[in-house]
Image (tube, rainbow, N blue to C red):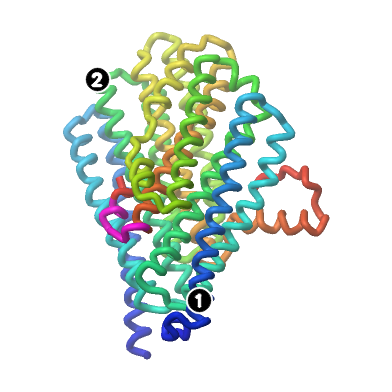
Amino acid sequence: MAEQRKTFHQELDEIRDEIVQLAALVSEFIPRGTELLLANDMRGALSLIEADDEIDALTLRIEEQCYHVLALQQPMASDLRSIVTAVWLTGELERSGDLMVNVAKAARRIYGANLDPRLRGLIERMSEEAARLMKLAIDAYVERNASLGAALDDIDDTLDQLHRDYIEAIFESHADHHLGLQPAVQLALIGRYYERIGDHAVNIGQRVQYMVTGWLPEQTGAARLRARADGEVDEGDTSSP
Amino acid sequence: MSPAASADGGPARQHYTAELEQLALQVEMMGVLVDQNLERMRDVLRGGDASTATQAVAADDRIDAMNVSLMERCYELLRREAPVASDLRLIVSVLRVTPELERIGDLALRVVKLQPDHELLVAVPRAFDVLETMADHAIDRYRDALRAWSALDLDLADRVAAEAPPGVAATQLVEALLAYGGTDGVAVTLRTMVAGQALDRIADHAAVLGARVRYLITGDPDHLAAEVR
């Protein structure tokens, strides 16, 4: 039995290590995608698009490994939460990688477009912020730091504000005829991709909270529902979930 | 080996089978609650009605509660029964599908919460038309995914999973917004893009649901791979 538990925990460690490896691949995509966008680097764009296959393959391997552990072991409580969290995290990370693939594809669509310094600066800052959020999310996972996981929602406000400034800059550049319609459209979509990476990092933070404490964001809504059933809260209460 | 697994066809096994059937039905019920909120979302988007928005916010708490309850039930079954093969696939699928449903509910609420800014959303008629079309598309796609789950319909699950993300609509949306010359252009754009992004993602999550149903039916890891793009 002791031998079996040891093997089981080794398997859990392997899953965690592979998640970290997946996160490293995805995190590396963020500055790389931004650089190729700003440098009009078409070879780099193709290379990043092709490199996504490695992320996809690793995602599947981790997920299948999680199912294997579920099938062959009988994990209890926190171990079970770790495995379910790993499955969730693969989805969040894999989709973050896809978003940088979208940036690379958009870079190809706007090849040769002349971006003014303000737009370039905002793209760089959004990229840095998205990468920082992803790093913090993975730090929270590795360190099993539920407080850091919970803080990511507030930390993400910086990226949201940058995105607002960025949209404003696109509008101004387009209105001043410095930026054509198609590049403006693609740039607006690119901004959205960075913002969504931030959202995925926040989701990872919430999943880490769940892994460590068993708390789910949905439990807040469930508690409100119980309170309403007990007559403590009016049905019209619209505090956000 | 658990008693349920050893007593093939006995009362414990029958109870376990009934629990699995109930689990699948509960997911369907959660899916219906999400569906109702998607309909409220469409109403709020069209007309900006505040009372419907309030109902949607309250209904989302019920969706959250079901998600928590279903997850606890899955954990209990994993602990107690050590399921294998198709039983394990069902439980794992429930653990993967319910957060998708919950996320779709949250995205619907993101659109609903734009209700106080409804005037800004309708300021650019062409963009608003695109938003309405995106909402229709997202809801249709979601309903197909839910039907595939209920009927374990592989063909339908295949179609939902294979449908390409509606990137064209997002492009049309931004084009319409950039052509708008109003002084409130940035405010209009930010709100419209929030709504557009949420609707886009609802359709995307519906495709993931389709892929999950396909995997549940076939157990083929290649079908799992189809979800990963």
Picture quadrant where residue A239 is located: top right
Picture quadrant where residue A118 is located: top left
Q: Which residue is mark 1?
A: B14
In the image, the segment drawn in magenta is B217-225
Could you say which is closer to the camera, residue B225 or residue B152?
A: B152
Nearer the camera: disc 1 or disc 2: 1
- The chief SS type of the magenta part is helix
Relative image position of residue A97 (x, y in whole percent): 33, 45
Could you say which is closer to the camera, residue B110 or residue A137?
A: B110
- Residue A112, disc: 2
The residue most toward the right is: A231
Name the residue rendered at 40%, 43% in the picture: B207
Type of amino acid under label 2:
Gly
Name the residue rendered at 28%, 58% in the picture: B220
Q: Is residue B183 above or below residue B158?
A: above
Q: Is residue A168 above or below residue A193?
A: above
Relative image position of residue A184 (x, y in whole percent): 38, 19
- Disc 1 is placed on an element classified as helix
Could you say which is closer to the camera, residue B137 or residue B45?
A: B137
Number of numbered discs visible in the structure rendering: 2
- Disc 2 is placed on an element classified as loop
